[in-house]
Image (cartoon, grey):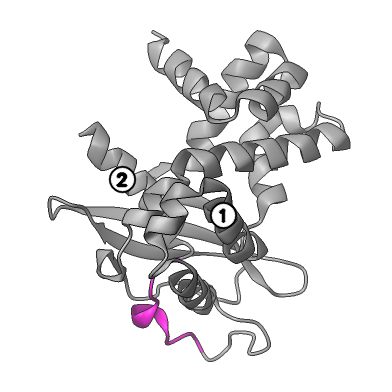
Amino acid sequence: MLRRLALATAIAFGTVVAAPAFAQTSAPAAADATQPTPAQVVQTIADQLASAIEGHRDELKKNQEKLISVIDEVFLPHFDLDYASILVLGQHAREATPAQRERFAKAFYNSITHRYAEGLLNYTRGRVKVLPFKGDLNDKRTVVRTQVVLDDGKLVSIDYAFRKGRNGDWKAYDVIIEGISYVTNYRNQVDAEIRKVGIEQLITNLETQGEKALETMAKDNKDKP
């Protein structure tokens, strides 16, 4: 069970940059024609990631730094890191200084990326089905819904929340696996950790320990009565 969820998680963070968008190519006519729709963003990144990974899996598996750089180049331009980080910090975002918010955003993203990067190498195009579009792209938020096929053939529902920026571009800011939001999940863990050690120590832990700090937060949160 844990292995299946771990694989789904890795694919979830990858399929926002790797899911073919064949089912969502028909956007409402009122959508801003000057900016790609969320489905088109997914398609663009899919092509870029496929070009970077296909035929290079063995090389990337041996060189995590290069794998991380590929993810950064393909994913970061289409992910609203600052907004996602503020949501994860929750009420503590108001307490943090601008410098702390910036450090947290970078450290948190790096921790997540290092934790799940290698799982992306298990991704194949056939694993993901993008479901028919629902919603109005005139709104400032929308969701790209997908189903991921795991190794045992079971389907996992994975949704990607997108937010429209001031210039009309769409960026992803959350991943929802089987109804569980990663923003909400990590916000609860971050809140508990900040109450325990303070925001500065949490940021330092993420900067110096990375994915180990995430694992510690997850374990502490799970052990709570």
Asked whether, in this view, residue 42 is left or right of residue 10, the answer is: right
The picture places residue 16, in percent across and down from the top left corner, at: 47, 62
Give the main secondary structure, helix, strand or loop, of the magenta stretch. loop
The picture places residue 51, in percent across and down from the top left corner, at: 47, 75
Residue where numbered disc 2 is placed: 7
The picture places residue 22, in percent across and down from the top left corner, at: 35, 82
User: What residue is rendered at 86% in x and 35% in y?
Assistant: 99
User: What residue is rendered at 61% in x and 56% in y?
Assistant: 69
Asked whether, in this view, residue 90 is left or right of residue 200, the answer is: left
Q: Is residue 159 magenta?
A: no
Q: Is residue 30 above or below residue 108?
A: below
Which is nearer the eye, 183 or 116? 116
Which is nearer the eye, 129 or 2? 2
How far is mark 1 from mark 2, CA to CA?
A: 21 Å
Q: Quadrant of the N terminus?
A: top left
| Secondary structure under the numbered disc 1 in the rendered image | helix
Q: Is residue 87 above or below residue 23?
A: above
Q: Amino acid at mark 1?
A: Lys
Q: Is residue 133 above or below residue 18?
A: below
10 Å crowding of disc 2: few (<14), some (14-19), many (20+): some
User: What residue is rendered at 67% in x and 51% in y?
Assistant: 81
| Secondary structure under the numbered disc 2 in the rendered image | helix
Q: Say which of marks 1 and 2 sits in front.
A: 1
From which residue to which does the magenta span run?
18-28
Residue where numbered disc 1 is placed: 66
Q: Is residue 32 visible?
A: yes
10 Å crowding of disc 1: few (<14), some (14-19), many (20+): few
User: What residue is rendered at 56% in x and 54% in y?
Assistant: 66
Report the residue that reaches farthest toward the left: 152
Q: Amino acid at mark 2?
A: Leu
